[in-house]
Structures are given as C-alpha cells and as structure tokens.
Amino acid sequence: MTRGLLAGASLIVAATLLAGCAANELGDTPSDLRGTIDGSGSSAQGAAQEVWVAGFQRQNAFVTINYDPAGSGAGREAFLSGGVDFAGSDSPLSDDELAGELAACAPGSSAIDLPLYISPIAIAFNVEGVDELDLDAATIANIFSGEITRWDDPAIAALNPETPLPAATITAVHRSDDSGTTKNFTDYLHQAAPEQWEPEAADTFPFASGESAQGNSGVVAAVRSGVNTIGYADASKVGDLPVASLLVGGQFVAPTTDAAAAIAEISPRIPGRAEHDIALKVDRTSQEEGVYPLVLISYVIACEEYADPDVAVVLVEYLRHIVSEAGQAEAAEAAGSAPLAEGLREEVLDAIDSIR
C-alpha cells in the first residue's frame, strides 16, 4: 500500500483502490492536505472511527484514512512493528512496549497515548420481574467469580431491599476473547474490591465460572436471550436491556456519559511517562459525587516524532478533528461515547500539537 505523502490525485486514487478500506471518494472540500495514513486496533472505537474518518475525508478531498478495528492487542502489535501509523487501544502502552523498538517512529523518539474515546461499561441484566438493580463492587466481584450464585443472595438483597429478587440461579456472562473491556472491568474489581477479586487487571477473564461469549455483541446477545442473566459490555451496545447502578460515595450512580467523563477528568496520569503521554490511571475507588468508575478509556497511540514527517502532518490534523467539539459530538451520537471534559480536551490538544 502506498504510504506517506502522495504526489497527486492519481496516486491517491491508486492507493485507495489498493486499500479497500475507508476509501475516500474525493470528499466535498479540497484542501492542501494530501496523503494516506493507516490505523488499527480497538473495536470499541470502531463506530467512532467510522464517523471521524468520514467527516475528516469530506473536509479533505485528497486524504485517505484507513482504520481496521482488529482489536487493541492487534493494533498495538501493528504499531510497534511499523505496520500502521497509529493504533487504537483500550489500554495505554506498557512500560515494556515503550522501551522496545518503535518502527514507525524516528530514531530516539518514543510514543504517546492520547485518550480520545471514553465510554461507561454497563452491567446489563435480564432477570424476571426486576427492572432496577443496585450493586457494589464486592457483590459484582462475588457474582462474576462464582461466589454468589443466586439472585436472592443476602448480599444482593441488602442492596435492593424493595426489589422482589427471584430464588433463581445467576448466569454471569463474560467475554470469551481477550478484550480491553475485560481489562477495564477486572481493573475496577481489583481496585474497588481487592478482597473479593484478587486477580489483577487482564485482557483475559480469569475465572471459568459462568458463561462466555465473543465480543460486546456476543455478551449482550447472551444476556438478552438467557434467563436470569448478567454481563458486562460497552454501555453503547446494551440497547434496551436494564443496567445496574454502582455504589459510589454512598450513592448509586448509573452508567451515564457525564459520569464517565467526570471520572476520566479526575484520574491521575500514570507516573514516569513523557510530558505529552496522557496515560491515565483511572481512580476506580473514587468517592467523588457523580462519577462512574467502571469506564473504558480508549487511546490513540502515536509517535512523538515520525520517521516520515509527511505522516505526522496528516495525522496531527486528523487527531485535531477527533478531539474537536464537533468530532467528540459525532462520536457521542454514533457510538454513545462520552465527550472529553474541557480540561482534558485542552490537554490532549496540546499533546497532539507536539507531534512532529
């Protein structure tokens, strides 16, 4: 595939035909920006990337953006090996990944993590006669580890004194595939209920209890079609299934976009990173009013400096489109994500402008 700056419209068209993905059909508005950039990674970002790409290409007739929602792990691997110009990932690069070779980056340059997509992870359920459910981290941990097996368990009943819970077996549904959603879910449980959930955050679900399903859509389908079921999924994917509220600071908080954006804004950075690397350590134990700590923060991973400077020119403008108020609003409408709070948005813009 042709990469980097293209000499003219004929080469743009040729590269587009070869790409076969997110092809630009010569958008509405010509601009001085020209080139093709490739990305891969997070499927959670998939719907948002589609609208971001479409909007950006309409504004820049001679630019093509390709994004393959192959999954976070695949995207990080492709970026590290130089197979793509940027990655979408539901977790930031690890210290080991940052210390390794970054084939797309200029020699001596590192990579930065930019949080551009925030979505609450919902605990969806399908329990006969139950429309509302309140849960705390310890009870969720015991349900998904298999310690709590019945809906009328005293721990659930104590949190829902006015709810007629059935004397029925719980079917807890988890992801069968490695996923950023699972990593964020297990991180929440390990931080907020460490006595009940000893395993640390991981892409792979750590227990054999319950049922498993492929992807967010598979989990939602299993919860919907099952009996007395419960599962975790990106909130934008659960449709009309009822979702639980989480106990935070003495109040039960629903998985709204505002509450998800609030926890992202107050979460500190992971220490020891570069100046413009905005890798966040989500404060899952926060007791702040109105925050929802069970969130997925998905990143775009880019080079601080690219080996091909023409890539940086196009990517910077694309990322500025993503983080703009209009771009965040597009993603909120298409994917149900939470627009970045203004303080975090300005910080991300500064980081984007540092890319060379």
Image (cartoon, rainbow, N blue to C red):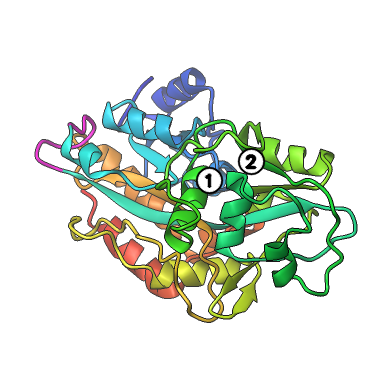
- Whether residue 330 is visible: no
Residue at coordinates 46% horizontally, 45% vertically from top-left? 183
User: In the displayed structure, would residue 243 be above or below residue 13?
Assistant: below
Residue 35 falls in which quadrant of the image? top left
Q: Which residues are magenta?
A: 101-109
Seen from the viewer's position, the closer of residues 222 and 38 is: 222
Residue at coordinates 61% horizontally, 56% vertically from top-left? 140
103 falls in the magenta region: yes
Residue at coordinates 30% horizontally, 31% vertically from top-left? 4
Seen from the viewer's position, the closer of residues 111 and 98 is: 98
Secondary structure of the residue carrying numbered label 2 = helix
304 left or right, relative to 160: left
Residue 37, image x, y percentages = 38, 35
Residue at coordinates 60% horizontally, 66% vertically from top-left? 136
Seen from the viewer's position, the closer of residues 340 and 329 is: 340
334 falls in the magenta region: no
Residue 93, image x, y percentages = 30, 44
Residue 208 falls in which quadrant of the image? top right
- Hey, what amino acid is under mark 2? Asn
Is the Cβ of the residue at disc 1 closer than 8 Å to that at disc 2?
yes
Q: Looking at the image, is mark 1 or mark 2 earlier in the sequence?
A: 1
Residue 251, image x, y percentages = 61, 79
330 left or right, relative to 278: right
Which residue is the site of mark 2? Answer: 216
Secondary structure of the residue carrying numbered label 1 = helix
- Whether residue 152 is visible: yes
Which residue is the site of mark 1? Answer: 181
